[in-house]
Image (spheres, helix red, strand yellow):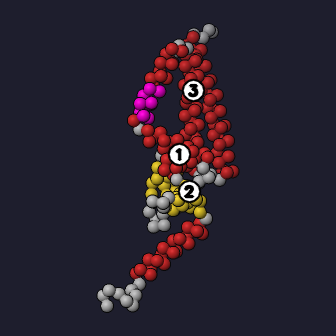
Amino acid sequence: MILTEIELKLIESFVLLFVLLVIRYAVSKLIIRRFKKANFDITRKQITVKVLNMLFFLVLGFSMVIIWGFSGADVIAGIGSVITILGVAFFAQWSLLCNITSGLILFFNHPLKIGDYVEIVDKDFPMSGQVENITLFFLHLRNKDNHVYTLANTIVVQKTMRIMKPEEFFEEIKKLEEEQENKNTPGTDTALD
């Protein structure tokens, strides 16, 4: 029995898909094991798995192009079209690209983790709170008044941050509560007297 050219390409495609799925599964398990040892949060693991999936589909796409024998000119024209569309979209939304880049910097190179208490050292808008989430675009910070603020990643990367001990953060909350109590207790000399 002799296989036709299309049947042979189909078999090669299925073998490639199987091999890449096994590799992706093994790498995913290694990443999950590494994240458990490092005690990273679930969000970082999810983003890493998403990046792994994107790389997997990229390798799969290029391999399929090679197996099915598309000409180099066709592939380059297709890639050029996609890059042009993405370039125009990113140029129109430059802040999105900056936020994604800043999110990756926060994710991989910043000591900041979800659950940390931080203080943003800024003359005009000082802020402190607990980091609730770090996404590709935003950092979610819960302040002393239990309000959640969403800060763009570019702002977080540009500002000086101090990672606080939880005791420091809670001491500041106690001071605020005491100040509120002192304001609410009527003094002996009031304007109504």
Q: Quadrant of residue 8?
A: top right
The residue lying at 56 percent from left, 38 percent from top is: 51
Against 61, is 26 above or below?
A: below
Q: Secondary structure at mark 1?
A: helix
**Where residue 38 appears, x then y in whole percent?**
67, 51
Give the residue pinned by disc 1: 103
Q: Nearer the viewer, mark 1 or mark 3?
A: 1
Q: Report the front residue among 63 and 180.
A: 180
Quadrant (top left, top right, bottom left, bottom right) of the N terminus? top right
Q: Report if residue 86 lies within the magenta region.
A: yes
- Give how far apart the Cα atoms at labels 2 and 3 are: 41 Å
Residue that carries the numbered disc 3 in the rendered image: 60
Which numbered mark, 2 or 3, is in the foreground of this view? Answer: 2
Does the magenta-highlighted stretch encompass residue 24?
A: no
**Mark 1 vs 3: CB contact within 8 A:** no
Q: Residues within 10 Å of mark 2 (few under 14, many from 20)?
A: some
Please name the residue shown 62% across and 52% down the image.
111
Viewport quadrant of the C terminus: bottom left
Residue 163 in which image quadrant = bottom right
- Amino acid at circle 1: Gly
Going from N to C along the chain, the mark reached first, 1 or 2, is 1
Marks 1 and 2 in Cβ contact (< 8 Å): no
How many marks on residues? 3
Picture layout, residue 54 above or below residue 150: above
- In the displayed structure image, the side of residue 183 where residue 62 appears, left or right: right
Residue 161: give its label: 2
What is the chief secondary structure element of the magenta stretch?
A: helix
Chain part drawn in magenta:
83-91
